[in-house]
Amino acid sequence: MIKYNEPNPLNIFNLRRMAHCPPHFHKVEFDLNTYDKVVSAWIYENLEGRFNYGQIDSLSSAGKLIRRHRAAFELAGEASYFALCLVDINNYPGLF
């Protein structure tokens, strides 16, 4: 983790953030209320495993196409920790 000054080999070789989302990753979908950089910086600082972060298109309950954000993690524990902390991460009072 970055906050403990321990180098992560996945970060060193630029293998941590994946461009695609493999099917075995655990996904967390949410509406973004802050900047993308805030979310990705939190992931880099507090988690260790590989992840994917980006936008996805999904259908709402009314049948409309909406754009949401998704963070997907290789480790299930990291997905759970992110989902629990999402309320605090995704809260930037000056944006919306």
Image (tube, rainbow, N blue to C red):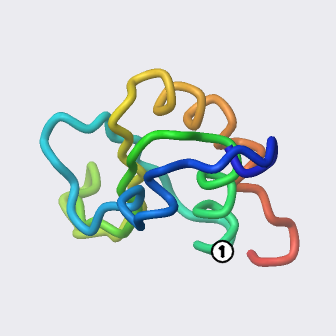
Q: What residue is rendered at 41% in x and 67% in y? A: 14
The quarter of the picture where the C terminus appears is bottom right
Helix, strand or loop at disc 1? loop
Query: Left or right of 8: which side holds 57?
Result: left
> Number of marks in the image?
1
Question: Would you name the residue on which mark 1 appears?
Answer: 35
Few, some or many residues within 10 Å of mark 1 (<14, 14–19, 20+): few
Amino acid type, mark 1: Tyr
Horizontally, residue 94 falls left or right of residue 49, namely right
For the point 42% across and 51% down, the residue is 71
On the rendered image, what quadrant is the N terminus found in? Answer: top right
The reply, left or right, for residue 80 in relation to residue 34 is: left
Residue closest to the eye, 7 or 75: 7
Task: Give whichever of 50, 4 is nearer the camera.
Answer: 4
User: Residue reaching furthest left?
Assistant: 23
Specify the farthest residue to the right: 94
Q: Residue 48: percent from the left, percent from the top?
A: 54, 40
2 up-or-down from 18: above or below: above
Location of residue 94 with respect to 3 vertically, above or below: below
> For this rendering, which residue is in front, 63 or 13?
13
Residue 64, horizontal then vertical, whole percent: 23, 67
Residue occupying the point 62% across, 60% down: 39
48 with respect to 20 (left or right): right
List x then y, in percent, for residue 6. Answer: 71, 44
Q: Is residue 89 above or below residue 64?
A: above
